């Protein structure tokens, strides 16, 4: 999608952080943006500030862990803007702990938002992107933790799922005129450390509701890195370029490249160990 002016985008988690950075960058390119979020006050503020720049944006409240609310948001988007061309599945939570902190509710909350919200977004908006024949693009926010996992946290599992979903859909949707990108950011200056502020009451028993609130040394370092992370506005510009140039992977920096290369080396070593063996049939 090289010419974005006049196109319509739906962006989740758009009231702050990466979502706001993406919505802002797209609006600056002349895209009409429906900004979706779960926080009314923050969304109103973000929409109002963008509208003062003459950006054609609107806001809609939705809990993306509930499929019917995504559908309602889609209906609102069509009613307001017409054809939809860009879907950005960005909303997410830093939920769930490592092995000895697991709880059923923490797993459910994290997977419902980070993975099922993306799946339902694509299920609902995919046909809308196809229907008008003008082309489209889907961007889903995973994480660098969708390619390297330092623990068994539900967060990592959910982000691996987003990467797998995006990789599988890219060749499947290309013949239908829809590009697919997966965003794998590193440490970005967002509110992810405060994810529990938006946890709905139905997940009240999520005892490890926000793994980034833990007090381990590793988590303290991560929280500090996030607080001093990359500007979300820069990430928004990268995503806009990724849409225009149909990038498969969108990275924010090369910090974790050596760790990912080490992972690939370990996988190759696993194949090397069995290369000369003859399977029993």
Image (cartoon, rainbow, N blue to C red):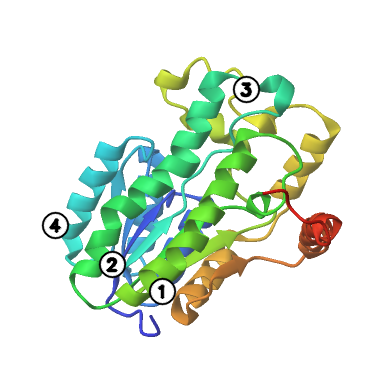
Circle count: 4
Report the side of 199 relative to 83 (left or right).
Answer: right
Which of the marked residues, 1 or 4, is nearer the chain's N terminus? 1
Considering depth in this image, is 180 or 46 the residue closer to the camera? Answer: 180
Q: Residue 77, how many percent across, how many down? A: 22, 56
Residue 28 is labelled as 1
Report the side of 246 relative to 124 (left or right).
Answer: right
**Inter-mark Cα distance, 1 to 2:** 10 Å
- Label 3 sits on residue: 208
Q: Is residue 268 above or below residue 193?
A: below
The residue at 32%/40% (across/down) is 62
**Inter-mark Cα distance, 1 to 4:** 22 Å
SS at mark 3 in the image: loop
**Inter-mark Cα distance, 3 to 2:** 39 Å
Q: Give the foreground label among 4 and 2.
A: 4
Residue 251, by quadrant, is bottom right
Mark 4 and mark 2 residues within 8 Å of each other at the beta carbon:
no
Answer whether residue 209 is visible to the viewer in this image: yes
Quadrant including the N terminus: bottom left
Q: Residue 232, how many percent across, how many down? A: 58, 60
Q: Give the foreground label among 3 and 2.
A: 3
Considering depth in this image, is 258 or 272 the residue closer to the camera? Answer: 272
Q: Residue 132, how many percent across, how many down? A: 18, 72
- Mark 2 is surrounded, within 10 Å at the Cα level, by few (under 14), some (14 to 19) or many (20 or more) other residues, namely some
Residue 32, by quadrant, is bottom left
Report the side of 162 relative to 184 (left or right).
Answer: left
Mark 3 and mark 2 residues within 8 Å of each other at the beta carbon:
no
Answer whether residue 177 is visible to the viewer in this image: no
Q: Residue furthest bottom?
A: 2
């Amino acid at each position: 999608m090289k010419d974005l002016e006049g196109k319509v985008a739906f962006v989740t988690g758009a009231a702050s952080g990466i979502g706001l950075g993406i919505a802002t960058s797209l609006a600056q390119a002349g895209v009409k943006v429906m900004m979706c979020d779960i926080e009314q006050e923050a969304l109103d503020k973000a929409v109002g500030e963008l509208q003062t720049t003459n950006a054609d944006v609107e806001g809609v409240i939705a809990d993306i862990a509930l499929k019917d609310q995504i559908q309602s948001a889609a209906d609102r988007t069509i009613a307001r803007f017409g054809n939809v061309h860009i879907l950005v599945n960005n909303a997410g939570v830093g939920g769930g702990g490592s092995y000895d902190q697991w709880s059923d509710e923490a797993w459910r909350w994290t997977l419902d938002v980070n993975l099922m919200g993306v799946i339902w977004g694509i299920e609902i908006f995919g046909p809308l992107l196809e229907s008008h024949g003008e082309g489209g693009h889907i961007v889903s926010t995973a994480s660098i933790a969708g390619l390297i996992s330092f623990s068994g946290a539900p967060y990592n599992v959910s982000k691996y799922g987003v990467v797998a979903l995006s990789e599988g859909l890219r060749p499947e949707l290309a013949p239908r005129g829809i590009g697919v990108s997966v965003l794998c950011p590193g440490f970005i200056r967002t509110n992810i450390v405060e994810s529990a502020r938006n946890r709905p009451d139905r997940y009240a028993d999520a005892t490890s509701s926000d793994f980034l609130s833990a007090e381990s040394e590793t988590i303290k370092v991560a929280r500090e890195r996030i607080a001093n992370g990359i500007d979300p506005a820069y990430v928004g510009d990268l995503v806009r370029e990724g849409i225009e140039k149909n990038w498969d992977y969108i990275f924010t920096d090369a910090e974790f490249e050596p760790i990912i290369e080490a992972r690939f080396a370990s996988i190759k070593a696993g194949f090397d160990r069995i290369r000369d063996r003859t399977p029993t049939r």
